[in-house]
Amino acid sequence: MLKRIGRLKILQEALAAALVFYFGLVRRTNRFVVEPADFHSRVVPSPPVIGAMWHGQHMIAHFAWPQGATIAALISRHGDAEINASVLRRLGVIAIRGSGGRAEKMRRRGGVSALREMLRELSRGTTIMLTADIPKKSRVAGLGIVTLAQLSGRPIRPVAVVTSRRIDFRSWDRASLPLPFGRGAMVLGEPIHIARDADAASLEASRHAVEAALDAAYARAYALVGCEDPGRRSREALRRSVASSEAQRSAAGDRN
């Protein structure tokens, strides 16, 4: 019952409007430092790019982009994500619906059509913003973002926008809700280019490069506001678990 009520269009739109107002309050009442100082001048002359974020740390990533820039973002087709899509539309961001993950899930959840739509938008000069990590595996970058960069020829730019005052949740992605009246930081990482003829090994190396660049951007952003990245410990534990699982699968394959 509560889920059905929560998915009523009128309630979703009301909540989206409230969130847009709230994020505006956060933007106006936090003193943001930008690094590098010429952040916008580096980005504006050479769009489009693929802006990469970590899931759970993406709520105010739109603060970083220059006003007037054409931006699109990938949003899940799940019903609960409709509020996110409505927030983006109110902010002037194009919402592309679809999900990443494994190939079979991408087909079922619209990931393949979303990839085609993102490629079309990039060809039109639209910058794409998306979370680099795969669902339920926080801060483990998927191959989706590097594949998009490979097919489009556009660079990946890590983007971190954080605040000193926030609520950190114990969710799978260690999400943070920014609060007003504090300090903030916006950090832009160096571009990561993926060759069009990159093989599987090169794409895997690029995936790790995206992880490292995003980790560095968030570590720097949180350092600028005098905090530790709230997702650092969970990231390290999960990556150890993923590496162990991959090693076990590889060993099993060798035995077979």
Image (tube, rainbow, N blue to C red):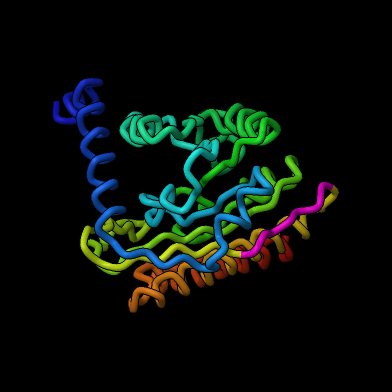
Examine the rendering and report whether any part of residue 64 can be seen: yes
Residue 136 vs residue 178, the one in the foreground: 178
Q: Is residue 14 above or below residue 25?
A: above
Q: How many marks?
A: 0
In this view, which residue lies farthest toward the top? 9
Question: What residue do we see at 64% from left, 64% from top?
Answer: 190
Q: In the picture provided, is 156 more to the left or to the right than 240?
A: right
On whether residue 98 falls in the magenta region, the answer is no
Question: What residue do we see at 37% from left, 54% from top?
Answer: 56
Residue 37 vs residue 203, the one in the foreground: 37
From which residue to which does the magenta span run? 190-196
Examine the rendering and report whether any part of residue 245 can be seen: no
Question: What residue do we see at 33% from left, 57% from top?
Answer: 175
- Picture coordinates of residue 93, whole percent (x, y): 46, 34
Q: Is residue 180 above or below residue 107?
A: below
- Residue 106's quadrant in the figure? top right
Q: In the picture provided, is 183 more to the left or to the right than 202?
A: left
Assign the magenta stretch its main secondary structure: loop
In this view, which residue lies farthest toward the left? 1
